[in-house]
Amino acid sequence: MTGRAPDQIGAVHFICLDPRKAKRAKIAQVLGRVGPIRWVKLPPFSLRATAAAKQAAQTAMRMSKNRGWSGLRKWVNGWLLARQYAGTYALFRANPQAVAVCWNGLNGGRRVFMQAAKDAGARCLFFELAPLPDRITMDPKGVNFHNALPRDTAPYLHWGAQAREAENTWHGLRDHITQRPSDQARAAAGDLPPLGDPFVFVALQTPGDSQLRLFGGAFPTVEGFVAACIEAAHHLPDGWHMRIKEHPTAPTDLAAAFAAKGDARVFLDNDTNTFDQVRAARAVATVNSSVGLEAMMFEKPVIACGQAFWAIDGIATQATDQAALNAACAAADRLAFDARARSCFLDYIDQIYYPRLDAPPEQVVARLQGRDAHGFWEV
């Protein structure tokens, strides 16, 4: 796809797989000023399923939370997804100017809808919540690790060199970051070391989170990651400890498991505010939680243990297996990052990547033009 100026891109209209409720309202707020939106409740259906349709269905099922299905149920699901791909492909072949829109789009019917649209030559926009307040994710390639952002520092540094009049706008973001409210009461943490002692803070995710399942790498479960962190804590420098906090929406409570382990260097702290712990920590570790990105705004070294779009050399430390996590903890007092590269990266996602819900139409259209001058949107 080649870049086109907004006045050359033609009339823009959208065919959106309806996410309903609040998510639909957010999409409508962003896109409604750009062009008409046609909402479809389910992907269209066609009996003419090609080999490409069947392959897309298999991929969607592998990405699904319910990928353990077998027998008749698995066959029926694959049969339906293949026919939804075929119907969606036909829809966008018949509407070549339409833009395919979906919330998340990582698995199931949403995945085959967007894959079929892409294969039919349609432009795409994937929506998702943003880790920044009052913002939205709107990406032409995908969300989370699948987004269109570069995975090296050079484009961000190049962009930052040309945007110096608006440097460090990200500094104001940390004043608006708050932790999510907890869904349930947690067991008391018990005796904890002072926050003034040196420690690594570990932010856990919700068990079964798609970020873990799909992009967790060696750590696809909360339990497995906790076990890895407990082992890695033995490698921390003298006088250091590790504090672990469960995700506020996690349905389980790890307090009993921690008490049984009785490890003297690892502590479960569900009581202290997440970002009070981030502020006090000497480093922050996570599989790929947005807390890792948010911790950068508090100028902390961040250890990424899974696949994350922000896990870029120079911006974060990557520790994608047990040995690397052990090594990162052993060097906890020496972890560093490229302050200039990280600042340009944070400025870019603040000023450009995560649009506000009242984004001007030209900011939406820019996501549909292909490669921009800095190479961010080639898909």
Image: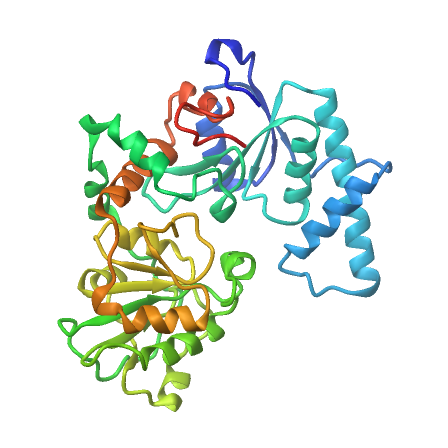
The image quadrant of residue 289 is: bottom left
Left or right position of 236 against 106: left
User: In this rendering, does residue 185 appear at all?
Assistant: no
Considering every residue shown, the one lying at the far top of the view is 7
> Which residue appears at 86% of the width and 36% of the height?
48
Q: Residue at x 57, y 37 (%)?
A: 102
Locate residue 17: give its quadrant.
Answer: top right
* Percent coordinates x, y for residue 56 in the rendering: 73, 45
Q: At 21% from the left edge and 80% from the top edge, which residue is drawn?
A: 192
Coloring applied to the structure: rainbow
How far from the left and from the top, in percent, is residue 376?
Answer: 43, 32
Residue drawn at point x = 21 percent, y = 68 percent: 333
Task: Name the spot of residue 42 as percent of width and height, x first.
Answer: 69, 39
- Quarter of the picture containing the C terminus is top right
* Residue 341 vertical placement versus 210 (above, below): above
Q: Is residue 64 left or right of residue 242?
A: right
Residue 104 in the image: above or below residue 215: above
